[in-house]
Amino acid sequence: MNVLVIGGSRGIGAACVRAFAAAGHRVAFTWHSDADGALAVGGDTGAASIQADAADPAAAGAAVRTAAAALGGRIDALVYNAGAAHYGLLQDMTDADWRRVMAVGLDGAFYACRAVLPGMIRQKFGRIVFVSSMWGQAGASCEAAYSAAKAGLIGLAKALAKEEGPSGITVNCVAPGAIDTAMMAGFSAADKAALCADIPAGRLGTPEEVARSVVFLADEKSGYINGQVLGQNGGYVV
């Protein structure tokens, strides 16, 4: 299977690239600014590395075309992992802050899907997996824009699942909770301990755990799973 991961240079995206490659799939991934991370992931996996801003419609379309060419002319699975975080009161957000969170977190998924769907429809097969968040399901105080973007991914997945299902294409979401990635770097050890105390599993999740779910949903044998949201948060949001 040929897989394109949007946002694959670090964290969950990098774990997805590695998991797909380890499972024997051909992989391409995009990255925006983390050149060192992209070099490491590409070197570890042999995956095609493509620099692109997921929020730029022209760049997103070009990245899909480049990935398809690198993968032999077709893309079977798309994983959309790009996202931008913002912490603070909604009333203090600037227009630019809001637009950037929405552009990377939601608009980019539209651009990527628009670019890959014609090929998937022609081949009568496709797997699309969005990396949403538990805050897209439940909402988070002081993360209104991020929650809105991730909720938007869930709505987009459910609508596309109905729209594209007749063409052999499934669209699903994973909704991770507190995952031990660079986004947690600003948390102190005490903060992490307090957070883990509120999680029934008693710990943070790992990018590799999320990646295994993504690979499962993208599998050819997962064709009867469509329009679903797989929560992966240790029981924090149920």
Image (spheres, rainbow, N blue to C red):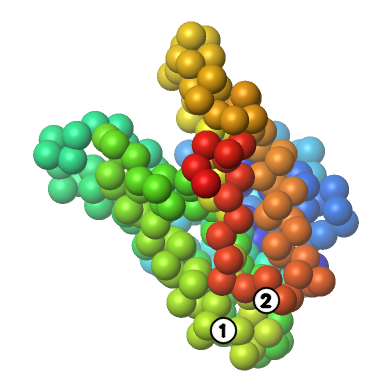
Q: Dot 1 lies on which element?
A: helix
Which residue is drawn at the image coordinates 81% and 51% (left, top)? 21
The answer, for residue 46, to whether it is visible in the render is no
Which residue is drawn at the image coordinates 27% and 35% (left, top)? 142
Above or below residue 184? Residue 113 is below
Q: Is residue 42 left or right of residue 24?
A: left
Relative image position of residue 113 (x, y in whole percent): 51, 71
Amino acid found under the numbered disc labelled 1: Glu
Q: Is residue 39 left or right of residue 85?
A: right
CB-based contact (under 8 Å), mark 1 and mark 2 = yes
The residue at which mark 2 appears reads as 126
125 or 56: which is nearer to us?
Answer: 125
Relative image position of residue 48 (x, y in whole percent): 70, 53
Amino acid found under the numbered disc labelled 2: Gly
Which residue is drawn at the image coordinates 76% and 39% (left, top)? 43
Which residue is drawn at the image coordinates 87% and 56% (left, top)? 24
What quarter of the picture does the N terminus occupy?
Answer: bottom right
Discs 1/2, front: 1
Which mark identifies residue 164? 1
Distance, label 1 to label 2, CA atoms, is 9 Å
Give the residue at the far top of this rendering.
190
**Numbered-mark total:** 2
Above or below residue 23? Residue 207 is above
Relative image position of residue 100 (x, y in whole percent): 30, 48
Q: Is residue 190 left or right of residue 68?
A: left
- Mark 1 or mark 2: which comes first in sequence? 2
